[in-house]
Image (cartoon, coloured by chain):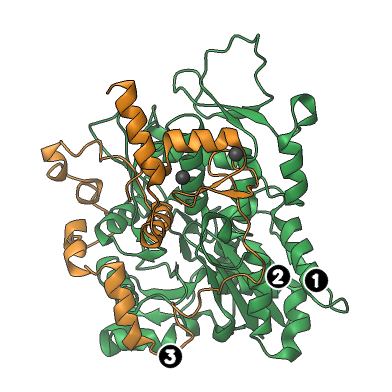
Chain colours: A orange, B green
Amino acid sequence: MSARESGRVKEAEKRRVLDDAARKRRARKAIEALEQDNFHEDPHADLVMSKKVPKFADSNEKPTRKKKSKSAEYYKMRFRKTFAQLVEEDASFRPDPPNYLSAQVPPSQFPDRYFCAVCGFPSNYTCIPCGARYCSVRCLGTHLDTRCLKWTA
Amino acid sequence: MSESSCYILDNGAYTAKVGLSTKLPKVVPNCIMKAKSERRRPFVGSQIDECRDASGLFYILPFQKGFLINWDTQKTVWDYMFSKECCPVNFNETPLIVTEPLFNFASIQEAMTEIFFEEYECQTLLRINATDLAEYYHRKTHNNECTVVVDSGYSYTYIVPYIKGKKYREGIRRIDVGGKVLTNHLKEILSYRQLNVMDETYVINQVKEDSCFVSQNFMQDIEIAKKKGSANTIVKDYILPDYTTIRRGYLRDVVKSDEDLEQQTLRLNNERFSIPELLFHPSDVGIPQMGIPEAVMHSINACPEENMESLLENIVLYGGNTLFPGFRDRVYNDVRSFALDHFDVNVYLPDDPLTYAWEGGKHIFRDPDFYSFCMTKEEYEEEGKALAFERFDI
Ligand SMILES: [Zn+2]
Ligand SMILES: [Zn+2]
């Protein structure tokens, strides 16, 4: 890309502003990411045989146990419900509070605090295109160069 | 019928605390991990100690959002725990106390009952909340009337009030912030500011454990962290493990510019206290919820007024997050500032906050009525799973 072209792209980006829905989507994605167990792929995913290899559970015969133990795979099939399904079921198991959903604490009585998305120190400014917080011209520059509208969410 | 020992399994979402009541508990990772460096086998539970290179570990956890969802994983980890390799047990002879999350879903409760009676052939089973065990332990050692138990674990922080030994359900509060959120947030900000560590949950969890503390005065610490040179008493460097000479990283004074250092380092400044701060201000990362001290007050205010005094005098903390230096003092100072002056406030942090609930299991086993809390295999065979819902107050 030539300098002039990239300049033009920058101009166009300057005028772009994320709408409210996109900002909320971004915020939700950020919170969901805090729940994730892994951010990379299973390093053994390409090992086709890994499932067939006798797992610890099968190879370890306990002398005190008379009957043959059922496999881990059996219990995966036997008790297969997702978190969402279980929450839904709970509406009939514990229809009235107190229950899992009602136990969640409400928002704080104290005002929200804002921190610079770049350096983590308190921030007094909001980025106009995306709504992120920043504390200084320097951090704003880093933010525009690295995140801001470069993220698609 | 009464046995000399029981088996206690405090089945946490990140670590299980497990062992016979006559021995010391083992803290076992409740997961299967896969390493890039070791392609021949996954590591189950504490087997991870045998892994020479723990970089890029991939986690397979039985728990999701604090509930037991992945039963194949859990079965594999339990088989490991109950085997000679970890803490062997014969459930035909030894009663089992196993913990479950508060408000555990009905299907999961049924599955717990089924797997322990049928698969593991338990003779005597007690399914119970870990907070119940903690409350029991505190009450037996303090002779108090009411207790507020704060369990700050991997998936959540729960605040549970007890009145005369009974859970007061209307007062239970959950904050959706636990150790996992803290580690993930630390990973995210370090990856953006310094070095991509998104694949290094295991290592960054150690960075968190080794470096973070709970601030007693957040804005003051922010000002210190802004300072340059020796006036900044917060900034430190963390030497990352390289798995040749260093197996676990460590915190040290900032590396001087003329120092020749081969190891990879992370510079930790406001991260050291901004991360645990999320337990006190979840809204700092956009989670619209109260922090722990405010939630403790919210919980106590939902209880009968006549119990307020005893509740404030018996706030007990346990769980991995309570190990951060300064955690207890911050909870105490904040609750003290929220509560009316004429009330006393006591906040207890046990010597070993990780195994406190497990130790509570030892005490409840000695209760003269212990067997009346339990369900036997015969009862299960005669009356089925429905009886378990009556007997166990989960
Ligand atoms: Zn900044
Ligand atoms: Zn922006």
Disc 3 from disc 2: Cα separation: 28 Å
Residue marked by disc 2: B315
Which image quadrant for residue B146?
A: bottom right
Disc 1 packing (10 Å; few <14; some 14–19; many ≥20): many
Residue marked by disc 3: A96
* Chain of the residue displaying label 1: B
Residue at 33% over, 51% down? A153
Q: Secondary structure at mark 2?
A: strand
Q: Nearer the viewer, mark 3 or mark 2?
A: 3
At which x and y percent is residue B225?
71, 37
User: Is disc 2's CB within 8 Å of ligand 1?
Assistant: no
Q: Secondary structure at mark 1?
A: loop
The foreground one among B102 and B253 is B253
Callouts 3 and 2 in the same chain: no
Disc 2 packing (10 Å; few <14; some 14–19; many ≥20): many
At which x and y percent is residue B189?
50, 40
Q: Are marks 3 and 1 in contact (CB under 8 Å)?
A: no
Residue at 74% over, 57% down? B330
Q: Are marks 2 and 1 in contact (CB under 8 Å)?
A: yes
Disc 2 from disc 1: Cα separation: 8 Å
Residue at 55% over, 62% down? B358
Residue marked by disc 1: B345
User: Is disc 1's CB within 8 Å of ligand 1?
Assistant: no
Q: Which mark is residue A30?
A: none
